[in-house]
């Protein structure tokens, strides 16, 4: 078992990473977060509830914590004002019953962002614990306190930074993750390798991606390494003000444009969109003379070997993507700012990248 501390003064917390942690979740919460409430409200989605409810409930019972489960539909569309308001109404009902409770998010990034936002705003903020159950959530979304929901066509438009009291990452739950979801999470892992950790990048080059999902030691290594890396960026720039935390967005400017232009459909999972986004950003870096051809080929080989896409299908309307999202004048300041790789383990934040350079890089990524 590994513990990674996120040092944020009074808002500090621990991330506990290990194998088969869920049967001891209640005990860990009591020890690690010092929460002494009598109840926990657990937000989840039906497939995760079917898999994990009994384990979580038993362990909370043992720690003397009564559980109330709230379910939302299993889709990105649950990060909505409608589901958010339903959750607040349910919390109000539970609270009127005289229960003192904290919240728990049990699931992937959708449940984590939505539940974290409900916790941030209910009664002006209540404590919560993340129990992330996807690779993407364990290596990324459960750390750093960014919570929020989407508006009809604007992802993560409403939110708050509200840190959890603890994060419990049980790597054994990743075994049941559908292969495509697991590989999508590996997209974020490779991102950490590029921005800050050459050793992690080499590990990914040397391993067999399809074998990692059942290799508990390898999973624990990946989740611990990425958690440490994210914690460091968050500690240095919790509220995304100095530009340090923005470096975590390598591949995300174009990645988000791809997700938006494809209507947040199933065409690309988040990690798949940022895989193409990382390739485009590297092409931009190459055009600006910041990196070398050799780095681009190494990145493409690794992404392909991992099973991630490196080219845009013709189903994504590139013109709409460029016009509506990347070059939207309303957002032009932030949109033309890119995180660009220099070499493995080092990226820079580049302001005012010329539109033509971006356009050519995106077009070069079409299949
Ligand atoms: N807050 C942040 O800092 C941050 C960072 C990155 C991404 N995000 C957000 O995260 C969301 C994406 O998260 P995600 O990729 O985890 O998607 P997700 O939450 O939709 O989960 C993906 C799928 O995996 C299933 N699943 C979850 N755990 C499982 C398990 N153990 N076994 C079997 N199936 C399981 C879910 O039912 C779901 O169908 C996006 O909304 C994105 O905006 C937030
Ligand atoms: Zn991401």
Image (cartoon, rainbow, N blue to C red):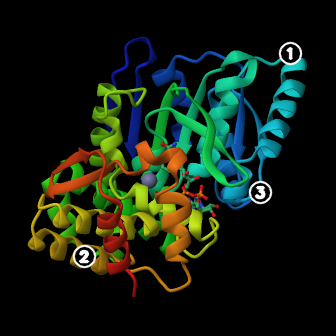
**Disc 1/disc 2 C-alpha distance (Å):** 56 Å
Of the 4 image quadrants, the one containing the N terminus is top left
| The label number, if any, that marks residue 285 in the structure image | none
x and y, in percent, of residue 30 in the image: 54, 22
- Placement of 6 over or under 300, stated as above or below: above
Relative depth, front residue between 63 and 224:
224
- Placement of 359 over or under 59, stated as above or below: below
Q: Is residue 229 left or right of residue 258?
A: left
Image quarter of residue 262: bottom right
Secondary structure under badge 3?
A: loop
Secondary structure under badge 2?
A: helix
Residue with the mark numbered 2: 300
The reply to whether discs 1 and 2 touch (Cβ–Cβ < 8 Å) is no
Q: Is residue 177 visible?
A: no
x and y, in percent, of residue 156 in the image: 60, 45
x and y, in percent, of residue 90 in the image: 86, 33
Relative depth, front residue between 23 and 308:
308
Residue with the mark numbered 3: 73
Please report whichever mark, 1 or 2, sits nearer to the chain's N-terminal start. Answer: 1
Work out which residue is located at the far top of the displayed protein and give it: 10
- Placement of 294 over or under 200, stated as above or below: below
Q: Nearer the viewer, mark 3 or mark 1?
A: 3
Query: Which residue does the image show at 50% across and 62% down from the upper left?
Result: 257
Residue with the mark numbered 1: 98
């Amino acid at each position: 078992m590994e513990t990674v501390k996120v040092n944020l003064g009074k808002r500090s917390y621990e991330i506990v990473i290990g194998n088969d942690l869920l049967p001891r979740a209640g005990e860990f919460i009591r020890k690690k977060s010092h929460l002494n409430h009598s109840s926990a409200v657990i937000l989840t989605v039906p497939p995760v509830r079917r898999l994990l409810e009994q384990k979580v409930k038993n362990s909370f019972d043992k720690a003397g914590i009564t559980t109330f489960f709230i379910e939302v539909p299993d889709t990105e569309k649950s990060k909505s004002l409608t589901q958010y308001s339903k959750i607040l109404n349910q919390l109000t009902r539970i609270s009127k019953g005289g229960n003192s409770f904290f919240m728990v998010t049990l699931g992937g990034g959708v449940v984590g962002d939505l539940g974290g936002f409900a916790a941030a705003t209910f009664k002006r903020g209540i404590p919560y614990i993340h129990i992330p159950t996807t690779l993407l959530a364990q290596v990324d979304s459960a750390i750093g306190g960014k919570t929020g929901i989407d508006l009809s066509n604007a992802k993560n438009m409403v939110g708050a930074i509200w840190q959890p009291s603890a994060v419990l990452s049980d790597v054994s739950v990743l075994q049941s993750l559908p292969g495509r979801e697991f590989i999508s999470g590996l997209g974020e892992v490779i991102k950490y390798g590029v921005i800050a950790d050459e050793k992690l990048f080499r590990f990914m080059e040397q391993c067999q991606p399809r074998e990692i999902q059942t290799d508990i030691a390898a999973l624990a290594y990946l989740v611990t390494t990425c958690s440490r890396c994210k914690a460091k960026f968050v500690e240095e720039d919790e509220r995304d003000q100095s530009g340090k935390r923005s470096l975590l967005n390598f591949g995300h400017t174009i990645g988000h444009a791809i997700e938006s232009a494809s209507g947040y459909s199933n065409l690309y999972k988040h990690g798949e969109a940022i895989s193409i986004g990382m390739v485009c950003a590297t092409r931009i870096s190459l055009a600006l003379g910041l990196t070398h051809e050799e780095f681009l080929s190494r990145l493409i080989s690794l992404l392909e070997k991992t099973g991630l896409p490196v080219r845009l299908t013709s189903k994504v309307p590139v013109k709409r993507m460029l016009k509506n999202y990347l070059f939207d004048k309303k957002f032009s300041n932030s949109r033309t700012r890119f995180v660009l790789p220099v070499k493995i383990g080092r990226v820079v934040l580049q302001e005012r990248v010329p539109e033509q350079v971006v356009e050519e890089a995106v077009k070069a990524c079409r299949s």
